[in-house]
Image (cartoon, rainbow, N blue to C red):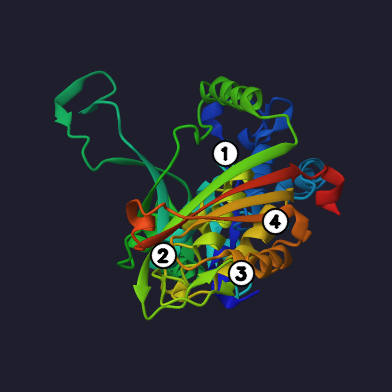
Amino acid sequence: MDSVFDALLAEVIVPAAGTGSRLGGSTKKTYLRIEGEPLLVHTLRRLGTSPSCAGIWVVVASEDIGFCESEILPRCAGVPIRRIVSGGATRQESVLRALQQIPSDAEYVVVHDGARPLVPTDLVARVLNQARTSGAATTAVPAKDTLRRGSNEHVTGDPVPRENLWRIQTPQAFRRDLLLRAHEQARSEGTQATDDAALVERLGVAARLVMGDERNIKITTPDDLPLATALLRAEQADACPVAIRTGLGYDVHRLAEGRRLILGGCEVPHTHGLLGHSDADALAHAICDALLGAAGLGDIGTHFPDTDPAYHGADSMVLLARTVDLVSRRFRIVNIDSTVKAEAPKLNPHIGRIRERLADVLGIDIERVNVKAKTGERMGPVGERLAIETEAIATLELRRADDISG
């Protein structure tokens, strides 16, 4: 795969060595069951479905390694677990131990609490994309309740303004070398922090904020368990049982002189080309969005942001190939139908080779790739020859579990 995609993948550290003393009881909180499965299993399964997860390093107490190998791993078939790591006395030490075992060629790491079993699958990709440009990023949600200072018995003082106050969550994403340096410095200085972003900040690197999710709760007190159960049941009730998914994609680019006109991976002779950060192949971009939408994986901007210089002038067929790879982990592509709206040039003579090129990258028969050409009837930006618009619909079929594991 082209090196432009290396940063899309990260090694994921899941600290789960805590005792969960605030929950009470004899069972550690990450092993408590929600809907019949240990809390940690829910967390690992969700992380494993993220397209940005290269592998998972689970950190547990040394005395729990045998239990995890016999009770947790068998429930996580298909989840790319690299290793069960023996944790330390603190969360900070546990994360450092995992960091020290991750190979040095891993460019990025994501840290996610094992006690957050409801992490949305797209959140890893979103926080990782921010870390690619800044070196560090954290998910967070804005404070909503009125904040006051006080003792255990009395509230004192004026309310604390909520503006610019955030409740920090995980996942958090970092350049591996940056996070390792932050941990090693903290160890040498004897300092502790409640999360990894705070350690990195001590090096002068501020973590970018990524909007988190209120459902991404951390199981801390007994009241959190019924809430997590209710949220999980609601998700299961809303889950679509059908095996066919449909996604819609759209893109538009301005026409400009001095640019090549690329549509569906093919150069079309014309006096103007499409203007954009990459090669501006609007048809390929619309198909990418349709595929990602059908698979529930966000959009093209999530995976290949136009703010990243790595994608400047990128070949959109490479982006499409990467999208196909992401989608194919759970789905088969059934059909693509698309429309290109351009007043000029005439596209009908080129549709045959565009379909061939798309079918080759999509890995399906040409009969399942349709491309239609329309004009703007001399109305609007398309009709005035200022832009080209594209639309695409993708139909996917859910793969069987045995196909995925095979």
Residue underneath mark 2: 306
Residue at (80%, 47%) from the top-left corner?
77
Residue underneath mark 3: 350
- Residue 236 vertical position relative to residue 78 in the rendered view, above or below: above
Quadrant the C terminus occupies: bottom right
Instruction: Name the secondary structure under disc 2.
Output: loop
Amino acid found under the numbered disc labelled 4: Val
Q: CA distance from mark 3 to mark 2?
A: 28 Å
Cβ atoms at labels 4 and 1 below 8 Å apart:
no
Judge from the rendering whether residue 69 lies leftward or rightward of residue 59; answer left or right.
right
**Residue 287 rendering spot, x and y as whole percentages:** 58, 55
Q: Nearer the viewer, residue 184 or 302?
A: 302
Cβ atoms at labels 2 and 1 below 8 Å apart:
no
Q: CA distance from mark 4 to mark 1?
A: 44 Å
Residue underneath mark 4: 369
Q: Is residue 233 visible?
A: yes
**Residue 392 rendering spot, x and y as whole percentages:** 57, 50
